[in-house]
Image (cartoon, helix red, strand yellow):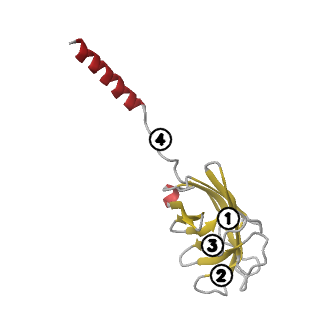
Amino acid sequence: MPRSVCLLSVLAVLASASVGCKTEDPPALFLDLAYQLRCIDCSPRVADGPIRNLSIVDGEMNSSLSCYSSPSGGTNLLYLELENEEFGLKLTQVRLGANPGDRCEVEIKEGAGNSYRGGCKPVGSDDGAPCEVELTKEGDAIVGTIQCTRVAHTLTPTYTRHFVAPNSEDPVEITIVGCTGF
């Protein structure tokens, strides 16, 4: 009988220890950025787009976020998508560092039917691509800047906008936490 009491005691301790040990869920996907699509030198001249000042977690503000990395040629490429009925942002095949790679692309959606898309170039380059993207990993976060000059409308390429920090011509600062695969 003492053996069964001892066995029950051990099982009770193990059961309580397993209840006390829990695995933490990965952090929620979080995105922080403030931007504006501006008509700095466009023709015909139109009003700048609304200021988007976003600090959101996936699912907030009727928005959907996804972010992950995919290995390619010995490096990880970042894919980020923010979807909302009123606005959106998509980064595809972005290599971390000052050279985002020649397959990198930025797409910005603003309002119904307005989408602007452009390729990326290394920061400070004279390359003809409209967007400069520089992202780095800092701890659990991906941080950096994005700036597009004269990024073309997907349906009417003669219409261009600047993707910049609000009321300026400065790059957009971005922070992403919870992106899987990094």
Q: Amino acid at mark 4?
A: Glu
**What x and y, as percent, mark residue 175?**
64, 56
Badge number at residue 111: none
Q: Nearer the viewer, mark 4 or mark 1?
A: 4
Which residue matches tag 3? 104
In-front residue for pair 174/129: 129
Badge number at residue 35: 1
Corner quadrant of residue 9: top left
Badge number at residue 24: 4
Q: Amino acid at mark 2?
A: Ala
Q: Earlier in the sequence, mark 4 or mark 1?
A: 4
**What x and y, as percent, mark residue 25?**
47, 45
Q: Nearer the viewer, mark 2 or mark 1?
A: 2
Q: Earlier in the sequence, mark 4 or mark 2?
A: 4
Please identify the quadrant where the C terminus is shown: bottom right
Pointer 3 and pointer 4: residues touching (CB < 8 Å)?
no
Pointer 4 and pointer 1: residues touching (CB < 8 Å)?
no
Which residue matches tag 2? 152
What whole-number distance in Å separates the C-alpha atoms at marks 3 and 2?
Answer: 15 Å
Pointer 4 and pointer 2: residues touching (CB < 8 Å)?
no
What whole-number distance in Å separates the C-alpha atoms at marks 4 and 1?
Answer: 33 Å
Q: Nearer the viewer, mark 3 or mark 2?
A: 3
What whole-number distance in Å separates the C-alpha atoms at marks 1 and 3?
Answer: 19 Å
**What x and y, as percent, mark residue 32?**
63, 56
Q: Residues within 10 Å of mark 3 (few under 14, many from 20)?
A: many
